[in-house]
Structure formats: structure tokens, C-alpha cells
Amino acid sequence: MREMMVVLIAVLLVVGLCPSQGGAAEKCHIGDASICLATPGCHWDYSTRGCAAGPAPKQDACAAHEDPNICNTNKTLNCAWNDTNKKCETKSG
């Protein structure tokens, strides 16, 4: 009986001391945008309003403009309104 208790305690100690093998998905399971952005390997996904693993997908900087007038006046980012797609995009070339 005593030997079994020693083995049980040893197993519990080993399991307790082993580093967690939690992946990035578990690490990024955060409900707060600011904490998510401060966590390496995570980014905030605005479409799902949640924290996701990996780098944020590349997005056109001009896509933030939803109005054609504002889009066409932004010369810093070289934006132009695309009538076909109905969105603001960076001018090519």
C-alpha cells in the first residue's frame, strides 16, 4: 500500500511539473481585444469579434474608407474609389 502511494505521488509530481503543450489556438482563446493584440502569435479578427491564432491577414489600408469622397481625397495612402467593387482601394502603379 505504501509503495502504491509513493508511485501515485511520483506520477502526480511528474504530470504537474511537465510544461503544458497548449497550442496557439488555446493561447489565443481570449475575449478581450487589447489582451489579444498584446499576446504574441495572436490577432483580433474584427469580422468574428474574437481572438485568432497567427498573424493578421494583410488588408489594403484604403479599405477603411467607406465613402467615395473620403477615399478619393486620401493622397497619403494613394487611395481611389473602385466603382465596380464599390470599395476604396490603393491605386496600382
Image: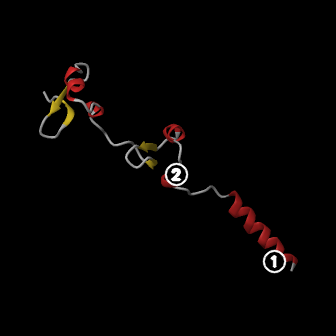
Image-quadrant location for residue 70: top left
Q: Which residue is pictured at 25% across the width and 19% down the height?
A: 76
Q: Is residue 82 left or right of residue 65?
A: left
Q: Which residue is pictured at 37% across the width and 46% down the height?
A: 47
* Residue that mark 1 sits on: 4
* Residue that mark 2 sits on: 29
Pointer 2 or 1: first along the chain: 1
Residue closest to the eye, 30 or 54: 30
Residue type, label 2: His
Q: Is residue 91 left or right of residue 64?
A: left
Q: CA distance from mark 2 to mark 1?
A: 38 Å
Q: Quick one: SS at disc 1? A: helix
Q: Residue 35: x and y, percent?
A: 54, 40
Q: Which mark is residue 55?
A: none
Q: Which residue is pictured at 44% across the width and 43% down the height?
A: 44
Q: Is residue 34 above or below residue 22?
A: above
Density class for disc 1 (Cα within 10 Å; few <14, some 14-19, many ≥20) is few
Q: Is residue 20 above or below residue 55?
A: below
- The N terminus is located in which quarter? bottom right
Q: Residue 65: x and y, percent?
A: 27, 30
- The single residue placed furthest to the right in the displayed view is 2
Residue type, label 1: Met
Q: Is residue 12 above or below residue 66?
A: below
Q: Residue 13: x and y, percent?
A: 75, 62
